[in-house]
Amino acid sequence: MPAKRRVARREWSSRDKRELKNLARQKTPARIIGRRLKRTEGAVRQKAFAMGLSLRARRRASRRK
């Protein structure tokens, strides 16, 4: 049986929180924020929720002619 992979958890620094807040204000998608902060999308969403931030990015309407 293979050994279980251990999850390495990192604390959120004040710099990480500030960056998350700024990117959320700019309507950056959670996936992109995660890449910038080297965290999973789920971790970003959970932290944003805990901080009371909205990650609701506006979707662009498709153009139909």
Image (cartoon, rainbow, N blue to C red):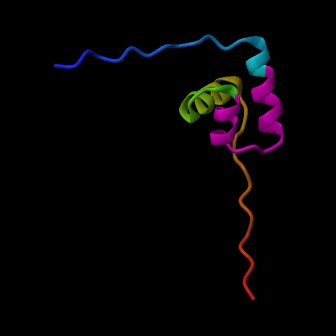
- Residue found 72% across the figure and 11% down from its top: 13
Judge by depth and name the residue closer to the eye, 30 or 35.
35
Q: In which quarter of the image is the C terminus?
A: bottom right
- Residue found 64% across the figure and 24% down from its top: 50
Residue, far front: 2
Q: Main secondary structure of the magenta part?
A: helix
In this rendering, the count of numbered labels is 0
Coordinates of residue 35 in the picture (x, y in percent): 65, 34
Taking 15 as reference, is 30 left or right?
left
Quadrant housing residue 33: top right
Please, is residue 62 above or below residue 58 in the view? below
Judge by depth and name the residue closer to the eye, 19 or 8.
8
Taking 42 as reference, is 63 left or right?
right
- Residue found 70% across the figure and 24% down from its top: 51
Coordinates of residue 34 in the picture (x, y in percent): 64, 33
Coordinates of residue 56 in the picture (x, y in percent): 69, 46
Please, is residue 20 above or below residue 8 in the view? below
In magenta segment, residue 34: yes
Quadrant housing residue 3: top left
Residue, far left: 1
- Write down the region rendered in magenta: 18-36
Taking 30 as reference, is 9 left or right?
left
Q: Quadrant of the N terminus?
A: top left
Quadrant housing residue 18: top right
- Residue found 83% across the figure and 38% down from its top: 25
Coordinates of residue 16 in the picture (x, y in percent): 74, 19
Please, is residue 36 above or below residue 58 in the view? above
In magenta segment, residue 29: yes
Judge by depth and name the residue closer to the eye, 39 or 20.
39
